[in-house]
Amino acid sequence: MAAGAVGRTGAADASARVPAPVGCGAASVVLIGIERADAKRSPADAADVLRSAAGSALRALSGVHSVAVLLPIDDTADAEAVSIGALLGAYQDTRHKSEAPSRGPVEWIALCVQDAVDVDSVGCATISRTVAAARDLVNEPPLDLYLETFAETVVREAEADDLRGLAIVMVIDDDELRERGFGGLIGVGSGSTRGPRLVRVDYAPEWAERHLAFVGKGIIFDSGGISLKPPAKMEKMKSDMAGAAAAVEALFGIARLGLPVRVTAWLALAENMPSGSVVRPADVLRIYGGTTVEVTNTDAEGRLVLADSLVAAQGEDPDLIVDIATLTGAPGRGPGAPDLGCDGHTSTSPAPPSTRTPHTASPFSVAQVCRCAP
């Protein structure tokens, strides 16, 4: 009734902030839409609706010190989805602001659940920290996050107290890449004054039951090369390394959770810039493993660096390879501007021949789980 009184509906993520009723103990209440329950909605979809709702609610409460979250939670999956959504909704990145924002992030979150619902608050906090660390990397300006500093950041995080000895990092520089025949990375990176890198991170617990490989596209800045992009919105091309950020932070999150799976992350790092030494349309590159590729558009650089990395990953014979990349144009022209483009393939091809710590502005912990009567 309160939402209707202020002209709001129950549409997903629709919100309204109203004064708290007498005796509530809070100054205000945020009403958040989760849509009407649908019998066709899967449990995973239902949990995702709750996660999104919790995130929207926390963003609406920026500047508030403490928040209690009460949503229709039926089981552990719902509770953990709400916890993660709330924590991610509280994320703020103010590192490069000249003045502190007037409304800071929420500092204390309580989750209200029934007695029968268990919540792994530590696991939820770990997942949220993982996502926040990837966001921190994507939000860095390219002046500060370039090839060397990206690799150094990965090395530094692997040496953190909660990861030391769990994740092993190997950085392959441009000289070694050229010697070993990584033609995609060398070609794409040829226009930059900073040489490309291939960073391999390995988490291999003795109790691992499977081996996953994450291959992440890490174009630190994508100008398009000699096939130059238009100036409008080119500043967004600093985020073309989001695949590599997601891949490595997912590995670190898995290691912190102690999951029984070996994970190897391959980060294909290069900067796609125009210059006199850049690769040209009609050039032919030899990818790691021997396959030749003719370049027809230097702004299609992602597939070149990923080809090198996918072949290298395949050489270790993992059970599954997950390729994570920002492919800006092709997915929209194919399936029609999806949120996520996915393609699955099982291959039996032979193996090929042979200074900044991530920072999160929010505390990212659920301070309390409140048990509510059914």
Image: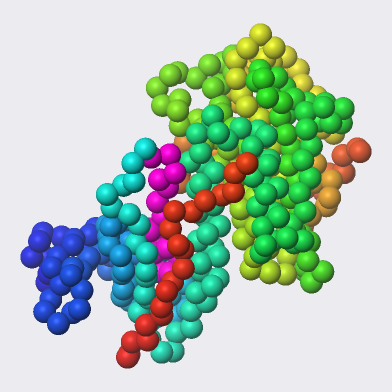
Quadrant placement of the N terminus: bottom left
**Depicted 152 relative to depicted 63: above or below:** above
**Residue at (76, 17) in percent of width and height:** 284
Q: Residue at x 65, y 20 (%)?
A: 192
Region in magenta: 82-97
Q: Residue furthest left?
A: 5
The image position of residue 81, as x and y in percent, is: 44, 68
In the figure, is residue 267 to the left or right of 233? right
Magenta highlight on residue 90 = yes
* Membership of 127 in magenta stretch: no
Locate residue 70, reporting x and y percent.
31, 75
- Image position, residue 234 (x, y; %): 45, 25
Residue 216 visible, this angle: no
Which residue is nearer to you in this view: 105 or 225?
105
Colour scheme: rainbow
Q: Nearer the viewer, residue 307 or 127?
A: 127
For image coordinates 52% across by 41% down, the residue present is: 138
Question: Relative to 208, is 281 above or below?
Answer: above
- The x, y position of residue 292, in whole percent, is 79, 24
